[in-house]
Amino acid sequence: MSEEAKEARGVRKTREGVVVSRSGDKAVVVMAERRIPHPKYGKIIRQRRKFHARDDNTCKVGDRVKIEECRPLSKTIRWRVLKAAEAVKAEGAE
């Protein structure tokens, strides 16, 4: 294998998104958004995608989180929550 192939092998994809739902005990659904220009017209388009991620009961709906690619943990879960970048403020709290 070449040097470039060895370096690329250990790199895992990361995404940042918002928790849109909690599915099950230790899983969350994260909506990630990419902003890219249209190939022909150049207008910025928002592309959204949902990822199922493993979480050990640290995130709530609305939290901004960073997720990382991992081995398949179940039928749909292939991502792991790394950290909560920004927590949602509780209503009524100042």
Image (cartoon, rainbow, N blue to C red):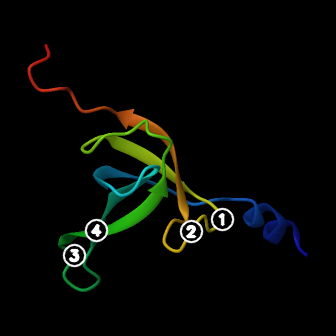
Give x and y (percent) for residue 83.
48, 38
- Which of the two marks, 1 or 3, is nearer to us in this view? 1
Q: Is residue 75 left or right of residue 87?
A: right
* Amino acid of disc 4: Arg
Say which mark, if any, is on residue 74.
2
Residue matched to label 4: 48
- Which of the two marks, 4 or 3, is nearer to us in this view? 4
**Cα distance in 3D space between marks 1 and 4:** 22 Å
Residue matched to label 1: 71
* Amino acid of disc 3: Gly
- Mark 1 vs 4, N-terminal side: 4
Residue 91 position by quadrant: top left
- Mark 1 vs 3, N-terminal side: 3
Foreground of the two, 4 or 27: 27
Give x and y (percent) for residue 52.
43, 63
- Which of the two marks, 2 or 1, is nearer to us in this view? 2
Residue 1 position by quadrant: bottom right
Q: Is residue 94 above or below residue 82?
A: above
Farthest-out residue, right? 1
Foreground of the two, 32 or 50: 50
Say which mark, if any, is on residue 62.
none
Farthest-out residue, bottom? 40
Residue matched to label 3: 42
Q: Kindly check if marks 3 and 2 are in contact, taking CB atoms under 8 A apart as contact.
A: no
**Cα distance in 3D space between marks 1 and 3:** 36 Å
Mark 1 residue element: loop
Q: How many marks?
A: 4
Q: Write the residue at 48% across / 47% down.
A: 55
